[in-house]
Each structure stands twice: as C-alpha cells, then as structure tokens.
Image (cartoon, helix red, strand yellow):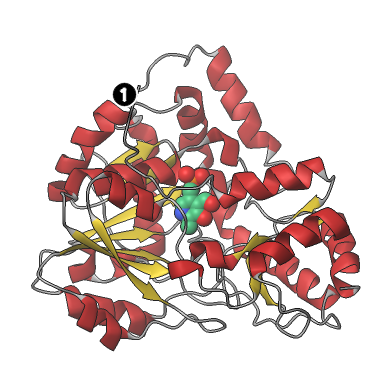
Amino acid sequence: MQHRSKLPNLETTIFSVMSALAHKHNAINLSQGFPDFKGDQKLIDLVSNAMNDGYNHYAPMPGIFKLREAIARKYDLLYNSSYNPEHEIIVTAGATQAIFSAITAFIRPNDEVIVFRPAYDCYIPSVELNGGTVTSIQLESPTYKVDWKEVKHKISPKTKMIIINTPHNPSGTVFTKDDMLELQALTKGTNIIVISDEVYEHIIFDKEQHQSVCLFPDLKSRSFITASFGKTFHNTGWKTGYCCAPKDLMDEFVKVHQFNVFSINHPVQIALAEYLNTPSHYLELAGLFQEKRDLFLNLIEDSRFKFTPSKGTYFQPLDYSDISNENDFDLAIRLTKDHGVASIPISVFNENKLDNKVLRFCFAKTDDTLKRAADILNKI
Ligand SMILES: Cc1ncc(COP(=O)(O)O)c(C=O)c1O
C-alpha cells in the first residue's frame, strides 16, 4: 500500500525522545514538563469519590456545568472578565486538544498563521494538518522580546491567526502589558483570530501580573484562551483543560470538539468543579515554583552556565556557550547518557533548528532532585 504523509517532516516529539533516553540511562529527568511530586491528595480523593458515586459515563459534551461555572468565576475573580458558562467555556482533553480544535475550526488551506519561535511543539503540525502555512517570527535568547514592527511587517491579507503563549514555554519569559497592547493595536479592525495559550497563567514570578488576553477588550473579542488543569494541579496525565472564547468563536469550536473528542473524563470534572472553588489552590502555585526556581538557580550559581531567571512557567533556559561548541541536541544527549541529567534542546522549537546554545531545564521537581541535578551541572 502506498500513502503520502500529511506531515512528512514531523519527528517524534522531543519530550518523548528525551524522557525515554533519561529512563534508559537512569538520568535525572529535567526534560519533560511535569512535577515529580504528587498532586494534592484532596483532589485525588475527590476524583475517586466521583468514581465511587457513579460518574463513570459520558459527561455532557461541553463539560459539566458546575465546572464551567467555576472556571467563569475564576475569570471574574482574577481578571474581572466574564465568560458565559453556557456557551463561552468548553472543557477539553488538555490544552493540546483545545489548541487543535481551535485551529481546525478556522484554518483552511493557504491561510497563514503567525507563530513565535521557539514554539511549543503542537502548534505547527496542527496548522499544517489543516493545510495552513506557518509564518515564523524568531525570538532570540536571552530576552526573547517580540519586535512588533516585524509582526506588523509579516501580517498579510492571508493572515488568519496569531498564536501567542505567555508565560512562555520554553523561554520562561512573559508578555508585558505593552506587548499585549501592541498585539491589540495590530489586530484591531482585522479578522485575525488569536490563540492565547495560557497554560502557565498561575506560574508567574516576582509579583508580575499575568497579562491574559481577556484583560484587553478588543483582543478578547478575537481570542481563544487555552488552559491546562494538568499543568495547574500537578496531574498532567489526567489530560484535562479548557478553552474560553466569545460565543461566535465558540460556536465554531464546538463543531470540531464534538467529533474529535465529544466529551472529557467525567469524574475528573466533578472533582475539579469543587477543587477550583478554593482560589488558594491555584494562587499558591506562583510561590511554590518561585521557591523552586530560586533554589535551582542558587544551587547552580557558580556553574559555567549563564542564565536570566525565568519569569514564569517551571522552565529555566541555561546558556552553555561558555562550556561547549556542540550543538544543543548533541549536548542534551551527551548530558543524559554520560552525566545523568536530561534537558530539552531549545533548537527543536526554533525556525530551521536555530541553535543558540541553550538547554531548557524543568525545575518542577523535589528539592532533592534539584540538588542532585545541580551537583552534576556544577561539574560540567
Ligand atoms: C505551552 C504549552 N501549551 C500546551 C501544553 C499542553 O497542555 P496539556 O498537557 O494540558 O495538553 C503544554 C504542555 O507542556 C505547554 O507547555
């Protein structure tokens, strides 16, 4: 049988590659973005109670109403921004499915989508599967600042969508209010849709405010927010997230959602509906991960790596240009095999695999794991 791949150049995601290598060589895994500590027992108990109470069949297609109401209350509380739980919030199988569905609902062959690089790895294949073309805007280490003049220059009559991600994986940078105002000004009066990937919304440091698209009325009117309970509540394996957008956008989103997943894990939704009603459950995250960032950076202060402290997410880029000329992929492999610590080479998220000699390390790990990893990094 002959077939023509729809994604001929796609390789296995780097997260699977590095995690498998870490496992094989028994290395400390600071590559994939998930905590190595257990989530809150209260939430786990709520899920098992929901299963015992019989919530084991299909949930309603957009998600259970109580969870959608709890999400709406969170936007009211944090941003004074309202999303109607009836038709502006949908529970999804993680942020990944929300992103895929939003892209699939709107992108037609030859539509252009602007993506900032380095970019989380699900954006581009989702655009390409739908026949769209990606216009990349490469951001440079260590500031990863957007040049909005370049964005203006790259917007064309074919530009259908812009994908942003703040706090940003893998750079650990955040968009400022000025960045958001620039984006709002550039898209005003156009038909451009924005996907704002805000999965790290609660993991933001040094008292910075998260600049959600919902704080900017014109941006809000054209934007999907995608979010991840897996990231927020330390249970990435549950693959539960959500998407918010104004009704006219959501009416199209739901047409894709109902046939690429239909509905999401029911007992987890019952549990999250209750758990989300206690704001400290998400408000405490910034403090927890800021302590971990500070611990990790203090531990490697005297190493030969250079860094700018991460402003958000649980990732820290480390520049190794004073240590080696190797390309970042080769170094990541060598560090895993020969030294026992796994990371992610940032070039895989860049246009044409641009190599700035930077590796991404995940610090969502126990203090003990971070100390063991730092001992290794300090000897390199
Ligand atoms: C920026 C970003 N977006 C989306 C996702 C996917 O989230 P989920 O696991 O909820 O699908 C991740 C996961 O690492 C991420 O880092």
Q: Nearer the viewer, residue 304 or 310?
A: 304
Left or right: 162 as drawn, with respect to 39: left
Residue 187 x, y percent position in the rendering: 17, 73
Q: Is residue 306 above or below residue 99?
A: below
Q: How many badges with numbers are in the image?
A: 1
- Residue 12: quadrant of the picture: top right
Q: Position of residue 34 (x, y in %)?
A: 64, 49
Residue 312 visible to an observer of this rendering: yes
Look at 21% across and 83% down and name the residue there. Answer: 153
Residue 167 in view of the camera: no
Q: Is residue 51 left or right of residue 96?
A: right
Label 1, residues with CA under 10 Å away: few <14, some 14-19, many ≥20: few
Amino acid type, callout 1: Pro
| Residue linked to disc 1 | 60
> On the rendered structure, is 245 left or right of 78?
left
What residue sits 19% from the left and 61% below the top? 222
Nearest to the observer: residue 262 or residue 142: 142
Q: Is residue 254 above or below residue 312?
A: above
Residue 96 screen position, x and y as percent: 42, 45
For image coordinates 27% across by 79% down, the residue present is 151
